Amino acid sequence: MSKFIQKMKNIGPGALVAAAFIGPGTVTTCTRAGATSGYTLLWAMLFSTIATIVFQEMSSRLGLVTKKGLAENIREKMPSGPIRTIAILLVIVAIFVGNSAYETGNITGGIMGFTTLVPGVPMQAIVIVISLLAIALLWSGSYKAIEKVLTGIVILMAVVFTITAIASHPDWGAVAKGLVTPKSGGNDLMTVIGLIGTTVVPYNLFLHASSTAERWNGVENLGDARMDTIISIGLGGLVSMGIIVAAAANMYGSGVEIASGADLALAVEPVMGEWAKWFLGIGLLAAGFSSAIAAPLAAAFATTGSLGWKADLKDMKFKGVWLFIIVLGAILAIALGASPTQLILVAQAANAIILPLIAFFLLYCVNSKEMGQYKNGIINNLLGIVIIVICCFICYRNMTSFIQSLQALLTAQ
């Protein structure tokens, strides 16, 4: 028992990943999945969780063995010349564009959570508070402090959404069937794509490799790193499934139009009373705030590593990157905040478009000679290729979605 408790104390980098992908987009997508399809798409969330564990284990292993982040590995392992330059530029542009969109959606999601708890507070004030809190935590330059805060938020979200799901009195037989019976049709296909796209997040591959290198000494900690990945991301998947279950139990068949994850609070009010507002408001605020910290942190790791700068949380160049992402996200949240759901949809679509590219780079690096006996085996490579092919399909389907969401967002202003 003492060994297990000691291993649990090693939970950290994986929790950062879970905190990052359980953002407002995840809450909104999972709410829509449960409200429109009931329990039938739980299998897609289970698949997404497993796919995330597969890729994040690769990323964590890469950071542990090389003691470098994914961006540094891409810079060093890609063939020299134009190919390397193009790869570095693609990473920087993809992460900057994707994380700027994500940060805007994260802050906007935090606004929705806060206004659910305390209606009437000016949006600009909430944006400033969320942004300043994120800046204060990251400016400390303390990896341990960031890890503890985000781990605590993940546990908080797990408690909130698990209690919400159980209090909704779901059909547990239907839940079990939904987990093991792949099924989709009509609009369900786009929801499945959304569930995968909002869970397998490209910037998390940079975050995990760098945070693992920061957290542990070397390959002797591989067992701890794997346990951290499985437990943390598994817990994140459980949170997402809890949202689907709660939405299915309270909203499926009601014909209610889902504007955002905040609508779930109204749906569970009959079974949870006044507690519904507090539980869901806290959950949505936590999702927005945790992702608002993780996204700029990942952007800083990716950018500094790609440019050959020092990936140090206390370095001013490193701080400058994440500060730029937070400030830009805050400005866009204020400027475009009239359409919070469209903001989140744009962020999700941007994520899905860049995912196959980053996943390919990861697979390339984790098969390098430098990995030695720790490079990918046949099974890991096959799983990685299958997931990349699925991600390419998601990318293709989301090109249109991205353009339409962006047009809708700009038209609404």
Image (tube, rainbow, N blue to C red):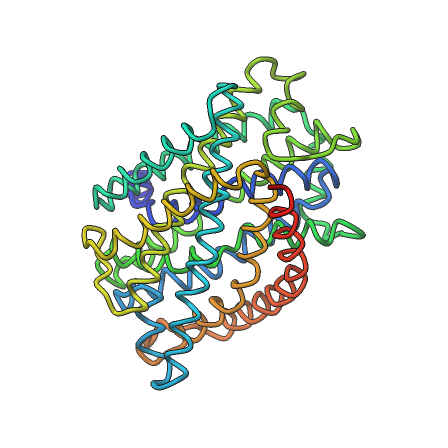
Q: Position of residue 208 (x, y in %)?
A: 37, 56
User: What percent of the width, then of the height, locates residue 172?
Assistant: 69, 33
In the rendered view, would you say 343 is above or below 81? above
Looking at the image, residue 357 sits to the left or right of residue 310; the answer is right
Taking 239 as reference, is 400 above or below it?
below
Which residue occupies the foreground of this view, 281 or 389?
281
- Residue with the most extreme top position: 274
**Res 245 quadrant in image:** top right
Kindly identify the residue that appears in the image at 56 percent across and 68 percent down: 388
Q: Is residue 3 left or right of residue 14?
A: left
Looking at this view, is 71 or 48 the one in front?
71
User: For the point 70% across and 33% down, which residue is it?
Assistant: 248
Quadrant containing the N terminus in the rendered view? top left
**Which residue is more in the foreground, 202 or 326?**
326
Quarter the C terminus occupies: top right
Q: How many marks?
A: 0
> Looking at the picture, how far across and down is residue 105, in whole percent?
50, 43
Figure check: 319 above or below 255: below
Q: Is residue 256 left or right of residue 67?
A: right
Q: Position of residue 5 (x, y in %)?
A: 31, 39
